[in-house]
Amino acid sequence: MITSFRLGQLKKRSEFLFVRNGKYRAIGGVVIQMRENPDKSDIIRVGFTATKKIGGAVQRNRAKRRLRACARELLPQYGLAGHDYVFIARDKTNGRNFEELLGDVKKALLTLAN
């Protein structure tokens, strides 16, 4: 049985800046920032970003798509309810095998949960 899990979205710059002041972990092809949601809701909100260091728009969008896929797969299991997450692409994000990228995200989420 497949259950659908919907993640909330971080859209405003102020939300990204709020999460920046929380905990973070950088592993392999990803940096993940985490902070408790100020609204005290149980929803997990997530945002994605990639700087121009990654490359042009095509490379940045590809990196964010890969991170979104990782988040959809792993946040329901390893994310903390009531927390906001920001996934930041690194220059290695597009070059890594998807299984390695999933491993990086899983390790980062487990570290942040402790």
Image (spheres, rainbow, N blue to C red):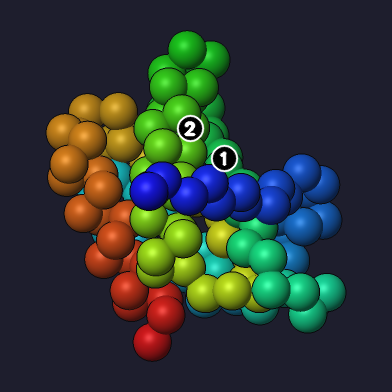
Residue at (39% x, 68% y) in the render: 78
Quarter of the image that includes the C terminus: bottom left
In this rendering, does residue 19 appear at all?
no
12 left or right of 25 in image: right
Is 99 above or below relative to 86?
above
The amino acid sitting under disc 1 is Thr
Q: Is residue 106 above or below residue 97?
A: below
| Residue 33 appears in the figure | yes
According to the picture, the residue beneath numbered tag 2 turns out to be: 64
Residue 35 to residue 108: above or below:
below
Name the residue nearer the viewer: 87 or 46: 46
Q: Which amino acid, by three-letter code, is at mark 2?
A: Lys
**Residue in view at x 33 percent, y 77 percent:** 111
Of residues 40 and 60, the one drawn nearer to the viewer in this rendering: 40
Query: What residue sits right under mark 1 in the picture?
Result: 49
SS of the residue at dot 2?
helix
Identity of the residue drawn at 77% across and 57% down? 15
Asked if residue 32 lies left or right of residue 19, the reply is left
Residue 20 percent coordinates (x, y): 63, 64
